[in-house]
Image: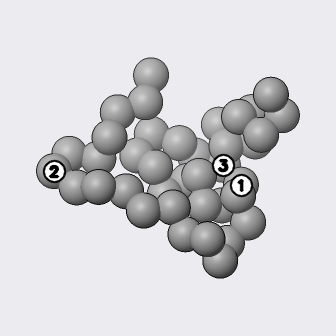
């Protein structure tokens, strides 16, 4: 389950690889980002 960061909006950086940019979202680490991209 993903939850937004408490009290703040999350901006996904455009200048980073998507796998890394997804980790800026609260609750998504590198392994979860890879799983998302595999789908």
Q: Earlier in the sequence, mark 1 or mark 2?
A: 2
Residue with the most extreme right position: 38
Q: CA distance from mark 3 to mark 1?
A: 7 Å
In the image, 8: left or right of 18?
A: left
Numbered tag placed on residue 30 in the rendering? 3
Residue with the most extreme bottom position: 15
Q: Secondary structure at mark 3?
A: helix
In the image, 39: left or right of 13?
A: right
The answer to whether residue 15 is above or below residue 25 is below
Q: Which residue is mark 2?
A: 7
Numbered tag placed on residue 19 in the rendering? 1
The answer to whether residue 3 is above or below residue 29 is above
Q: Residue at x 57, y 46 (%)?
A: 29
> Disc 3 or disc 1, which is closer to the eye?
1
Q: CA distance from mark 3 to mark 2?
A: 23 Å
Q: Looking at the rendering, in which quadrant would you find the N terminus? A: top left
Q: Position of residue 3 (x, y in %)?
A: 35, 33
Q: Residue at x 71, y 54 (%)?
A: 19
Res 19 visible: yes
Residue with the most extreme left position: 7
């Amino acid at each position: 389950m993903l939850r937004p960061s408490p009290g703040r909006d999350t901006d996904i950086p455009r200048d980073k690889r998507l796998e890394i940019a997804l980790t800026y979202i609260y609750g998504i680490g590198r392994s979860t980002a890879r799983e998302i991209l595999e789908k």
